């Protein structure tokens, strides 16, 4: 009897969890279409400013922090985009794993990475492990707005433009999850600054990446190693003023794009995780119900055996 009560208790608790998982899946399903649309709608503007910055980067004679490496400064900024809420499968853990690999790689190159974290889950993870964090942001990781992108970009641009003796950084990396489709979301490492040319043969879908996972950018055909001719531009009022105006917009648009595609990926990951959890809960309920029925049948069989045995014993005594 005690075993049957335990089975019933587990079935009831698993049923409650199944309802929670199913509700979370339905909520994520209702949000994913909007998150995907917002991410796709932001892409044309981001691609346009990306092309503009790439055109400026083609002028190798330009000396500006947006395109010029500062070899004398070993500090680099790393921004990790995690989630505020759980129940999203391996979304945050994948970001943290890739961030740790990037930090180790930068340490091996003799650089000094400074960590910036967006998302409550990532902040909690690193604070629990006493990891030094330069700055953090939390709130609405599944529905980020322009305001949070502006705050993050202002902080990172301030760190990038600051001199080395004032704690400035020479490079800027962003670790985020790129939304490919409802099933596939890939963790990417984007070296946002300084800007380097990507290969002209790359597909338009690769514009979200200025470099590969280790920040080694390729040269465009019109660059130093290419055969094509680069277009000529005149800058008014001056090169520095034009680049100073473009740099904040470039950083903000790229970070906003990363936030939006990360939000779409988080919602898709949550829907997939909750769908799997719902199926697992239903399967567990079926298994527990089967075991409960077997236990009940065994108990009934034992009782019948005892009754029959007692009846046989009485008949034997009467004879």
Image (cartoon, rainbow, N blue to C red):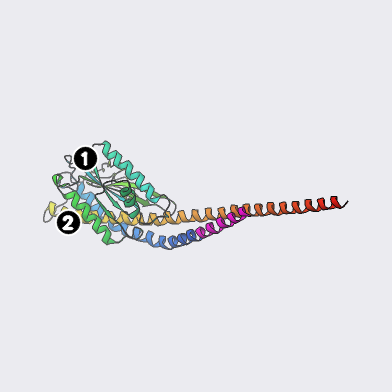
Magenta residues span: 1-18
Q: Which residue is mark 2?
A: 245
2 or 1: tag closer to the N-terminus: 1
* Residue 6 colored in magenta in the image: yes
For mark 1, give the secondary structure: loop
Q: Could you tell me which residue is drawn at 40 percent across and 57 percent down?
A: 267
Closer-to-camera residue (199/84): 84
- Neighbourhood count class around disc 2 (C-alpha, 10 Å): few under 14, some 14–19, many 20 upward: few
User: What is the x, y in percent for residue 9?
Assistant: 56, 57
Which of 231/203 is in front? 203
Q: Looking at the rendered structure, which numbered label has been put on residue 224? A: 1
**Percent position of residue 231, x then y:** 20, 48
Placement of 69 over or under 242, stated as above or below = above
State whether residue 89 appears in this view. Answer: yes
Is 289 included in the stretch rendered in magenta? no
| Label 2 residue SS | helix
- Residue 212 to residue 310: above or below: above
Residue 51 vs residue 282: left or right? left
User: Quick check: marks 2 and 1 in contact, CB under 8 Å?
Assistant: no
- Write down the quadrant of residue 15 in the picture: bottom right
User: Residue 254 at what x, y percent from top left?
Assistant: 27, 54
Residue drawn at x 15%, y 44% is: 164
Residue at point 15% right, 49% down? 162
> How many residues crowd mark 1 within 10 Å: few (<14), some (14–19), many (20+)?
few
The quadrant the N terminus occupies is bottom right
């Amino acid at each position: 009897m005690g075993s049957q009560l335990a089975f019933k208790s587990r079935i009831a608790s698993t049923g409650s969890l199944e309802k929670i998982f199913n509700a979370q899946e339905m909520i994520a399903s209702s949000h994913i279409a909007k998150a995907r649309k917002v991410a796709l709608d932001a892409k044309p503007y981001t691609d346009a400013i990306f092309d503009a910055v790439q055109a400026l980067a083609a002028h190798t004679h330009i000396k500006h922090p947006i395109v010029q490496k500062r070899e004398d400064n070993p500090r680099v900024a790393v921004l990790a985009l995690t989630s505020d809420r759980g129940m999203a499968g391996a979304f945050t853990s994948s970001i943290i794993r890739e961030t740790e690999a990037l930090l180790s790689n930068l340490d091996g190159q003799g650089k000094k990475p400074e960590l910036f974290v967006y998302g409550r889950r990532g902040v909690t993870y690193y604070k629990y492990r006493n990891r030094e964090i330069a700055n953090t942001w939390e709130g609405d990781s599944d529905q980020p707005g322009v305001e949070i992108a502006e705050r993050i970009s202002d902080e990172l641009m301030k760190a990038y433009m600051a001199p080395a003796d004032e704690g400035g950084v020479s490079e800027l990396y962003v670790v985020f999850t790129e939304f490919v489709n409802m099933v596939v979301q890939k963790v990417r490492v984007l070296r946002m600054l300084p800007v380097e040319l990507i290969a002209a043969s790359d597909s338009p879908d690769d514009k979200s990446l200025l470099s590969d996972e280790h920040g080694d950018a390729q040269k465009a055909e019109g660059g130093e190693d290419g055969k094509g001719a680069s277009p000529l531009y005149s800058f008014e009022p001056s090169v520095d003023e034009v680049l100073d105006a473009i740099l904040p917009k470039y950083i903000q648009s790229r970070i906003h794009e990363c936030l939006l595609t990360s939000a779409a990926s988080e919602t898709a990951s949550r829907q997939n995780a909750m769908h799997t959890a719902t199926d697992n809960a239903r399967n567990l309920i079926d298994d527990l119900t089967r075991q409960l029925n077997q236990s009940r049948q065994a108990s009934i069989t034992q009782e019948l055996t005892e009754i029959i045995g007692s009846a046989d014993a009485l008949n034997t005594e009467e004879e």
